[in-house]
Amino acid sequence: MKILVVGSGGREHAIIRKLMQSPKCEKIYCTPGNGGIAADGAECFNVGATDIPGVVALAKQVAADLVVVAPDDPLVLGMVDALQAEGFRTFGPKKAAAIIEGSKVFSKNLMKKYNIPTAGYEVFHDSASAIEYVKKQNTYPAVIKADGLALGKGVILAQNEEEAVTAIKEMIDDKKFGESSATIVVEEYLTGPEVSVLAFTDGKTVKPMISSMDHKRAYDNDEGLNTGGMGTVSPNPYYTGEVAEQCMKEIFLPTVNAMNAEGRTFEGCLYFGLMITPNGPKVIEYNCRFGDPETQVVLPMLDSDLLEIMLAICDHKLSDIEIKWHTGACTCVVMASGGYPLSYPKGLEITGVNKNGQVEGAEVFHAGTKLSEGKFLTNGGRVLGVTCKGNTLQEAINLSYQAVKKISFENAHYRRDIGQRALKALFDPSQFEYKQDLEDYLEENGIYIRQ
Ligand code: AMP
Ligand code: GLY
């Protein structure tokens, strides 16, 4: 089969590498793609990921048997509808279903209507009412969210009244995110560990993938600005069998059923951003697509054929497919450009990788890279996702960092503590008879215990 993948990040690279393992996969095309995707033999094009007529024309040009639309914005804009109207088998939700990510007001109202656990909220269209509400509530942090897509920057956790008022004014009055922030949601602040669960669904059956944990802040110890994600681990130790069962019953099935009841059947990958609160798991956000960088640790753990799964979803036969997962763990450490998520240079040479942009013993998923005269150059904020599987989480972490050390580019920035929070959750001090053994273990494993 000839497959066209739309997108250009580490997530798309991970999807493409997995699709290439399928015996049915003949050829992969990608637009716009990146250096690592091209080096893996996918033919890349210059059509932008949100150019709907351009992508439809490209699908015709390459006679695609399957099109996979990976990023949020083309999904929310209706790229799947346009491709399906031309007869292309397409993986991804239609516009009517992608709204689950495209509008927070929609998703919050959906959860309220169908009793799906989430943070309490109010919706505002004008800044004066929002400010009055926040002042009256007088509880901080106050969670302020833009209704629409905002490149992952539309959530502000305001620590005091001043920050809340500034955020509200910037969003509604100054239109910081254009129409996306003309309407805002002010939400109850929840606490607890976060878990990402991606789920395959054809609208009838929902099959959750292995769980994962993102690390959103730029610096170690969860300090610094929010980013698109600085690393991930899978599985997420907070997602126990019991939590998984509760999520299936109270969140996953009710969400898929709610979308059906609304006439917005969701087909594709539905992402559940969850918080395991003292009152049980609650939805923080839905995404209408594979997460980035969650996909970079989830798909390497998949022991089944991704292409078969995608085709089964297109044909509404997901219930016929058995999906298997590897045991062990997987870690992805993101190497970013110095300065990210603010401003950063591009075009710096990446050294230490082979001619395919890989290093031995790891899978290097390229995000912001380009291939120029046989050299890989940086071309974005998040540059590479260095990924390793291990028999244990500790082994996966060690292997990923060993691989990271082999790669360099000027001012490369990466977190040193990817997976430490998960390790701490797994860690059982009762197994140590002597305090000294425990301290040695912590030192050897580089585990710091945060109080
Ligand atoms: P999002 O961009 O929607 O993934 O949100 C970014 C981050 O903000 C989430 O990963 C959470 O850490 C945090 N967040 C969002 N909503 C809430 C909430 N209601 N309570 C506490 N933290 C939240
Ligand atoms: N890693 C979070 C997201 O994909 O939105």
Image (cartoon, rainbow, N blue to C red):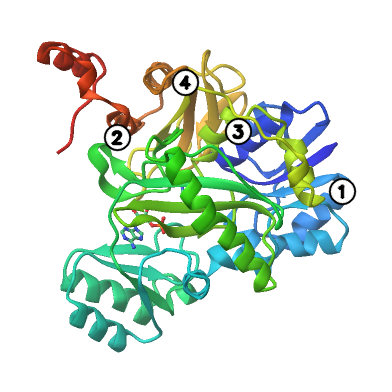
Question: What x and y, as percent, mark residue 337?
Answer: 39, 38
Q: Residues within 10 Å of mark 2 (few under 14, many from 20)?
A: many
Q: Which mark is residue 61?
A: 1
- Badge 1: residue crowd in 10 Å (few <14, some 14–19, many ≥20): few
Q: Kindly identify the amino acid type of the residue bearing the numbered disc 1.
A: Gln
The three-letter code of the residue at mark 3 reads Gly
Q: Is residue 194 above or below residue 232?
A: below
Left of 281 or right of it: where is 143? left
Name the foreground residue: 318 vs 416.
318
Q: CA distance from mark 4 to mark 1?
A: 35 Å
Q: Secondary structure at mark 1?
A: helix
- From the image, which quarter does the C terminus lie in? top left
Label 4: element kind: loop
**In the rendered image of this protein, does residue 401 appear above or below residue 413?**
above
Q: Which mark is residue 421?
A: 2
Q: Position of residue 53 (x, y in %)?
A: 77, 62
Find disc 4 in the rendering and name its residue.
351
Give the CA separation, mark 3 to mark 1.
Answer: 22 Å
Q: CA distance from mark 2 to mark 1?
A: 47 Å
**Residue in the picture at 55% in, 39% down:** 295
Disc 3 target residue: 35
Point out the tag, 4 or 3, that comes first from the N-terminus: 3
